Image (spheres, rainbow, N blue to C red):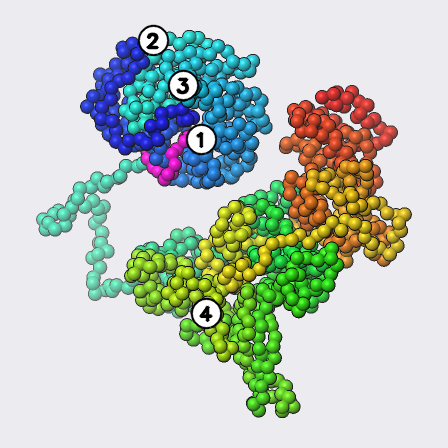
């Protein structure tokens, strides 16, 4: 219902009920119409308002049967008769729901649905009840248990819902769209745009969806497409209520007056057969609610807010004698509903009372209701109690079986001795995973024994007792199912399940509900995805890398900048680093370091991923440093990053480099000092294995200021001598990168031991004591805390397995020393105060920004994931909010996590590999503006790599300076591909094929055609892409690429590098052109480009009907353009030009998109013709072109 025209006094309702009420009637009505209903002048009881036994209910005439208080003083917002059981549901403005059973309105259940918002609509389903609030949809069992809780966008203001079938729901409100929600998957499946915002009422018939708007309009929408079929402009002010029955639609509302909105006493009635209004129906009450109550005739019940109710026929005249009065406790009626059997009416008022009116003494709410399930009564033992303190109590009162045999208790005491059977030891896995609450422990079932069967040790010498139940602490040797309890689900290796449609029907949103982009893992050497994400979320690295551009064909800095640009454009869709990894595989140093994995090694997990990613981390920083040091590049390719570095350094060096002094002291006394720099540090652990506490800061200082004894050349002694080598720090880096080097059990035990010591110290710090065997309960932990009340204690779970600090403090001393210590918020408040800047005393604080961890999983060979603290600038660009949040990045799975999870390392399955600490206020030191380094000169003519190319073989004309594309220009695009690796698939037992790994494609030819101007249809790009990788299939039949076309030594084509053509397409995308083509989604995916959706005009979707097959370019060209294309092979120039012509044809047939109905008929003719032709183009001697057929001419006439 729309409440805009209601009494404004409802905004602040009184908390108590009215003490006295007087019946109020229209002055023109007869007082005898109250139908024997009396009001108590002394007040109303709070528990219930039962009908007196003397009240007589006449058959066929509605009278009040019961009144009951749902919630004292809180207005009723909605009422609903259960469609499956004999129950009435009531929702209040306070978000509370109450149910009443049967005509007697016995309270069945009562629970809170929402803490702040009112309940706006209730819908009963077979297994529970749906409750709609402002921005929340909750599905609860009838007893109050939550089945699901679906949170809508906080900006939504929902008012109505409509159950279209058993599993589909429409939800509408005061916004310009309606959501379709699948109740099985609890996901939004469709969002329908609404031209007139404010859908507050929705109804459904066998022909239409009906949407009532706050503007007073009622729109009729198609059941399948949800498009507007008709619209009624019912009221000039606002709509209050409407209902549909048969071929009639009746509505009530408010009209605009000079003083505001006024209730209109004319009901607007419409005939749905002729789609026009019939004679308005004048009523004698102010209508606020109306419902059809079809029994013998199509009666209408019209209800006013003051409690007057009138029955009349929608096509007849309203009779004042058909008015009766509901006696609300509050001043206004707030809600009204009719049962499915039409035997009961429910009214809710503004004081929280519910009134039930029926037409029979024993009504039923539904024609066929199922039995309601009630709580079982408490079963009390029927035996009488016995008082054991009475000596004379006869023991014969205890029922025992009659026996004459000797009882076991008569066994002589001399022959018996107590020997209780010893309980078996508790499984080690249960003890390890058990959580205690009070004196009760909870642990997941490891499933190492049969259910309810416990073996006992019968002999002490039985050494093989319970051998199958011993679960080792190491993941190796565990069964699969117990191991799954160790590795959390979100940390397990994620894989893409391919179907016959490839990736189009894979639900990536199930794994990533954020707007950040994940990375796909199926590409070779994609183990580095987590590190790519870490570098991307470093704001200076992201900006400075994108400003870099050089002429090297395989430059990792350039390719990483292109990939970062894709991650910037993505709105939650995953990206792939195929071009970056292609360049990575060509670097000789990467192969020499063993960073290039074979497919078999990567799939089986033979390589040590922790060591691999640490070597990759060192390699990528070194390679980016070298790539960005080369400044002598042509002006057209010069990036903005050059202004940030000197001639001998790079921006990577400024960010990551740490300047050091290496001192070598010989035993002869001579000292040699040599300056050097490093981009990262490797942790060096102490040798002792005792349980001594060792802060992370101490280990880090030992690793940075390393001191070791080694053999070195001494110039004074002129021979190799034992020397003491020390390392001193000159300048600290802005980003501190640490390789953890946890590559053996020794380092893992050190981390585990230090985490246990830190856990015990944390408990003692908060006032508790812990012994070796003591287990802390939750109550004990709550008692611990700061007596001064400054800071709250963290939970036990947050302190377990934690040794790594969130912040560290470094200070350079005057004697070239370095002080390092762990730094907490408490230390900062006590030492510096809240307004202290870090650099005032030469002190720098580094905050943890990312941790890369190795997940040990024997089933899949392990994986690498990253915890990343995403900064404010990223949230501002993606979500429009400014806050910081930790996320887990597991390839294309992205999930927000608690910050303590980023530093918790259970060494059994979660091993730290790389740490990134950043200096506070880092972003303020760098210019973070991204200047696009790609200029228009990339589109000008360039030389071919092919040695045998001649000008007579040129297939395109490059753009002139006066032809440079502008925003919105059309460009026809087509690409051809070759196969580098074949698809890996397996056959299931039922004969179907399952794709394990898709084929790896590489772009071989890219063509761009002018879409306007005097040279329309002439290509300006027709590049063949040179490749150094082995091609296993040229796909000549589909691509037109022949062996030798991509070889610079023998090719006669215009051969270029992938980077050169990529820059051309990137410039076209950045300038804002619109690409026209057929199947562009796959083309852009293989080229590795992210193109905004509004810049793509794909003919495969323009000429497509929902839930129908996609149509080939060849058939569309034959049907619409009378062209025979793709005869023996494909030609990308021909395909791009044909796609442009098809787009022009689309604009012609749809009148520039203004006549979708006529174009829909054209598509129906297309699909009918396709089915008749089996989607095959006839041969030249066969059937003629459809332009000569009568069917096509009639289609064009539309």
Q: Residues within 10 Å of mark 2 (few under 14, many from 20)?
A: few
Q: Residues within 10 Å of mark 1 (few under 14, many from 20)?
A: many
Report the Cα–Cα distance between label 3 and label 1: 21 Å
Report the Cα–Cα distance between label 2 and label 1: 35 Å
Numbered disc 3: secondary structure: strand
Quadrant occupied by the C terminus: top right
| Picture residue at 65% right of the left edge, 90% below the top | 718
Measured as percent of width and height from the top left, residue 1185 is found at 82, 27
Can you tell which of label 1 and label 4 is closer to the viewer? 4
Numbered disc 1: secondary structure: strand
Can you tell which of label 4 and label 2 is closer to the viewer? 4
Please give the label number shown on residue 841. 4
Counting residues from the N terminus, which is met first, the one under dot 2 or under dot 3?
3
Please give the label number shown on residue 159. 1
Can you tell which of label 2 and label 3 is closer to the viewer? 3
Segment colored magenta: 104-122
Magenta stretch holds residue 640: no
* Residue 235 visible in the shown view: yes
Q: How many marks?
A: 4
Measured as percent of width and height from the top left, residue 1127 is found at 83, 38
| Picture residue at 51% right of the left edge, 13% below the top | 277
Picture layout, residue 1114 above or below residue 795: above
Report the Cα–Cα distance between label 4 and label 2: 91 Å
Counting residues from the N terminus, which is met first, the one under dot 1 or under dot 4?
1
Please give the label number shown on residue 321. 2
User: What residue sits right under mark 3 in the picture?
Assistant: 263
Report the Cα–Cα distance between label 3 and label 4: 73 Å
Say left or right for 938 vs 1090: right
Counting residues from the N terminus, which is met first, the one under dot 3 or under dot 4?
3
């Amino acid at each position: 219902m729309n409440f805009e025209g209601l009494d404004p006094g409802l905004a602040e309702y009184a908390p108590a009920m009215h003490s006295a009420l007087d019946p109020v009637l229209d002055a023109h009505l007869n007082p005898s119409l109250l139908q024997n209903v009396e009001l108590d002048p002394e007040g109303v009881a709070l528990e219930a308002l039962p009908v007196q036994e003397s009240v007589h209910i006449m058959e066929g005439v509605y009278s009040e049967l019961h009144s009951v208080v749902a919630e004292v003083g809180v207005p009723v917002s909605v009422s609903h008769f259960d469609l499956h059981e004999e129950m009435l549901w009531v929702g209040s403005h306070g978000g509370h729901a109450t149910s009443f059973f049967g005509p007697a309105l016995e309270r069945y259940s009562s629970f809170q649905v929402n803490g702040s918002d009112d309940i706006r609509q209730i819908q009963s389903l077979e297994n529970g009840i749906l409750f709609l609030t402002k921005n929340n949809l909750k599905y609860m069992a009838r007893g109050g248990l939550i089945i699901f809780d679906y949170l809508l966008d906080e900006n939504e203001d929902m008012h109505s819902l409509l159950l279209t079938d058993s599993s589909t729901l429409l939800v509408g409100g005061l916004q310009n769209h309606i959501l379709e929600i699948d109740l099985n998957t609890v996901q939004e499946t469709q969002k329908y745009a609404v031209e007139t915002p404010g859908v507050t009422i929705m109804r459904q018939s066998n022909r239409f969806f009906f949407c009532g708007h706050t503007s007073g309009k009622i729109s009729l929408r198609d059941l399948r497409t949800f498009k507007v079929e008709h619209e009624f402009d019912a009221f000039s002010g606002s709509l209050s209520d409407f209902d549909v029955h048969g071929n009639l639609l009746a509505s009530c509302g408010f009209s605009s007056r000079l003083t505001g909105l006024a209730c209109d006493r004319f009901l607007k009635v419409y005939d749905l057969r002729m789609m026009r209004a019939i004679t308005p129906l004048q009523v004698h009450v102010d209508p606020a609610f109306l419902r059809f109550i079809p029994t013998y005739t199509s009666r209408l019940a019209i209800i006013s807010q003051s409690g007057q109710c009138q029955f009349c026929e929608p096509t007849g005249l309203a009779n004042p004698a058909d008015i009766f009065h509901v006696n609300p406790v509050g001043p206004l009626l707030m809600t009204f509903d009719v049962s499915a059997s039409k035997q009961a009416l429910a009214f809710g008022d503004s004081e929280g009372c519910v009134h039930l009116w029926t037409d029979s003494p024993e009504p039923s709410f539904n024609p066929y209701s199922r039995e309601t399930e009630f709580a079982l009564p408490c079963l009390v033992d029927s035996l009488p109690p016995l008082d054991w303190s009475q000596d004379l109590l006869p023991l014969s009162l205890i029922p025992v079986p009659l026996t004459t045999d000797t009882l076991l208790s008569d066994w002589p005491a001399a022959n018996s001795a107590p020997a209780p059977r010893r309980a078996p030891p508790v499984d080690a896995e249960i003890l390890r995973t058990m959580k205690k609450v009070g004196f009760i422990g909870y642990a997941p079932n490891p499933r190492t024994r049969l259910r309810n069967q416990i073996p006992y040790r019968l002999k002490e010498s039985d050494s093989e007792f319970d051998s199958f139940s011993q679960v080792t602490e190491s993941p190796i040797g565990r069964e699969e199912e117990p191991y799954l309890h160790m590795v959390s689900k979100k940390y397990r290796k994620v894989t893409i399940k391919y179907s016959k449609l490839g990736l189009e029907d894979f639900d990536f949103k199930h794994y990533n509900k954020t707007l950040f982009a994940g990375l796909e893992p199926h590409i070779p050497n994609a183990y580095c995805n987590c590190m790519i994400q870490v570098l991307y979320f470093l704001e200076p690295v992201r900006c400075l890398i994108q400003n870099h551009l050089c002429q090297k064909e395989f430059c990792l800095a350039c390719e990483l900048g292109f990939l970062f640009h894709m991650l910037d454009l993505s709105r939650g869709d995953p990206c792939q680093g195929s071009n970056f990894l292609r360049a990575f595989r060509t670097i000789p140093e990467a192969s020499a370091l063993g960073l290039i994995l074979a497919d078999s090694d990567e799939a089986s997990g033979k390589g040590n991923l922790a060591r691999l990613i640490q070597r990759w981390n060192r390699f990528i920083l070194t390679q980016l440093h070298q790539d960005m040091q080369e400044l002598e590049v042509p002006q057209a390719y010069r990036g903005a990053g050059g202004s940030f570095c000197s001639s001998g350094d790079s921006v990577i060096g400024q960010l990551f480099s740490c300047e050091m002094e290496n001192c070598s002291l010989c035993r002869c006394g001579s000292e040699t000092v040599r300056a050097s720099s490093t981009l990262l540090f490797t942790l060096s652990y102490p040798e002792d294995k005792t349980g001594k506490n060792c802060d992370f800061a101490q280990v880090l200082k030992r690793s940075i200021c390393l001191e070791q004894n080694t053999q070195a050349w001494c110039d004074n002694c002129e021979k190799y001598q034992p020397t003491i080598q020390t390392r001193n720090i000159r300048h600290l880096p802005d980003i501190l990168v640490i390789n953890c080097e946890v590559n053996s059990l020794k380092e893992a035990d050190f981390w585990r031991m230090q985490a246990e010591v830190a856990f015990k110290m944390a408990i003692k710090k908060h006032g508790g004591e812990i012994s070796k065997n003591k287990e802390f309960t939750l109550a004990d932990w709550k008692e611990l805390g700061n007596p001064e009340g400054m800071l709250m204690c963290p939970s036990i779970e947050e302190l377990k397995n934690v040794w790594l600090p969130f912040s560290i403090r470094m200070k350079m001393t005057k004697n070239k020393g370095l002080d390092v210590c762990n730094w907490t918020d408490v230390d900062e408040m006590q030492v510096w105060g809240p307004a202290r800047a870090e650099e005032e005393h030469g002190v720098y604080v580094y905050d943890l920004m990312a941790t890369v961890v190795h997940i040990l999983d024997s089933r899949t060979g392990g994986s690498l994931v990253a915890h990343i603290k995403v900064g404010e600038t990223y949230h501002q660009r993606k979500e429009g909010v400014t806050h910081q949040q930790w996320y887990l990045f597991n390839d294309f799975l992205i999930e927000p996590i608690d910050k303590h999870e980023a530093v918790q390392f259970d060494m059994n399955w979660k091993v730290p590999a790389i740490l990134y600490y950043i200096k506070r206020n880092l972003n303020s030191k760098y210019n973070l503006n991204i200047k696009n380094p790609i200029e228009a000169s990339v589109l000008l003519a360039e030389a071919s790599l092919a040695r045998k190319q001649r000008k007579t073989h040129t297939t395109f004309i490059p753009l002139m300076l006066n032809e440079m594309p502008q925003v919105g220009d059309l460009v026809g695009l087509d690409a051809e591909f070759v196969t580098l690796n074949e698809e890996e698939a397996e056959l299931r037992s039922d004969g179907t094929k399952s794709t394990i790994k898709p084929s790896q494609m590489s772009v071989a030819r890219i063509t761009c055609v002018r879409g306007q101007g005097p040279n329309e249809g002439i290509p300006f790009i027709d590049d063949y892409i040179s490749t150094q990788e082995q091609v296993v299939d040229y796909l000549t039949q589909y691509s037109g690429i022949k062996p030798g076309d991509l070889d610079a030594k023998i090719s006669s084509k215009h051969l270029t590098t992938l980077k050169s053509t990529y820059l051309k397409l990137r410039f076209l995308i950045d300038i804002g052109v619109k690409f026209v083509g057929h199947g562009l989604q796959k083309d852009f995916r293989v080229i590795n480009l992210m193109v905004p959706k509004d810049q793509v005009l794909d003919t495969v979707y323009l000429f497509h009907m929902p839930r129908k097959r996609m149509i080939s370019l060849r058939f569309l060209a034959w049907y619409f353009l009378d062209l025979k294309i793709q005869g023996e092979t494909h030609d990308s120039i021909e395909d791009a030009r044909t796609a442009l012509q098809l787009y022009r044809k689309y604009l012609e047939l749809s009148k520039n998109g203004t006549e979708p109905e006529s174009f829909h008929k054209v598509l129906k003719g297309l699909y009918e013709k396709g089915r008749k032709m089996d989607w095959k183009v006839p041969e030249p001697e066969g059937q003629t072109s459809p332009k000569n057929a009568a069917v096509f001419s009639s289609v064009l006439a539309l």
